[in-house]
Image (cartoon, grey):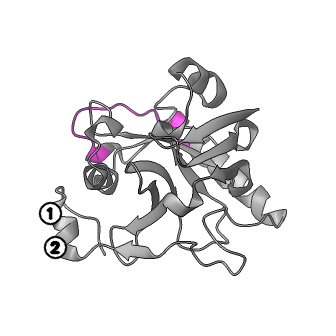
Amino acid sequence: MDMTVRCRCGQVRGAARTERAYTRATCYCRDCRAYARFLGGSDLLDAHGGTDVVPIAPTGLRLIAGLEALACVSLGPRGLLRWYAACCRAPIANTPRQAQTPYVGLFGAAFDAPSAAMDESFGPRGTLVIHAGSATGEVAPTRWRFVIGGLRIVTGMTAARLRGEPPAPFFDAAGRPIRHVRELTRAERDALGDAPAAH
């Protein structure tokens, strides 16, 4: 089943195949919170500073319209590539820097779907909790959920790699990002708050 992916204003649009999702995660890392501040969207975080993310195989995402409005930022020289809609500063996805790594972290906020449909398709928020120690409040991840969620991601990525699937639509045929990657300076990253991850 396809679910619509879109930015706030609707200029960037796409579709995600729910069966290609690896799991559903909530990430409490400091960089995700800094990224939300970069976009000016405190509403992107839950009560304890977590970001809703749906890890998915690259071929599970099609971008249909608004490619010209995509922008990319990295919080440091080795950080993830964080893709967003420049038109309305809405987050779309995170990707590794290497196009051959079969992983796209779609933001829950990028789905044009009610919470019940998200829960049915990907599981409830917090199915997999990442970086719980960096949360701004107490979160209680379960060890088995972490293990199962991690295994789903690793298994899905391994299968995609063995199938030789093409890279995510954020990269060209040569494996280069389709947009210039703006790397924040250390001062810019520090201004966003929270102790930054190692650069």
Residue ID for mark 1: 191
Can you see residue 80? no
How far from the left and from the top, in percent, is residue 32? 34, 52
Residue ID for mark 2: 187
How far from the left and from the top, in percent, is residue 79? 40, 69
Point 31% across, 49% down: residue: 36
Can you see residue 117? yes
Q: Nearer the viewer, residue 101 or 142?
A: 101
Instruction: Relative to 32, say whether 167 is above or below.
Output: below
- Residue type for callout 1: Ala
On screen, residue 181 versus residue 67, left or right, reads left
Point 44% across, 74% down: residue: 181
How far from the left and from the top, in percent, is residue 52? 44, 38
Extreme-top residue of the structure: 116
Q: Nearer the viewer, residue 57 or 72?
A: 72
Instruction: Give the total number of marks visible in the rendering.
Output: 2
Within the magenta stretch, is there residue 141?
A: yes
Snapshot quadrant of residue 41: top left
On screen, residue 64 versus residue 80, left or right, reads right
Question: SS at mark 2?
Answer: helix
- Residue type for callout 2: Ala
Residue segment shown in magenta? 133-147
User: Do tag 1 and tag 2 residues touch (Cβ < 8 Å)?
Assistant: yes
Extreme-bottom residue of the structure: 174
How far from the left and from the top, in percent, is residue 61? 68, 50
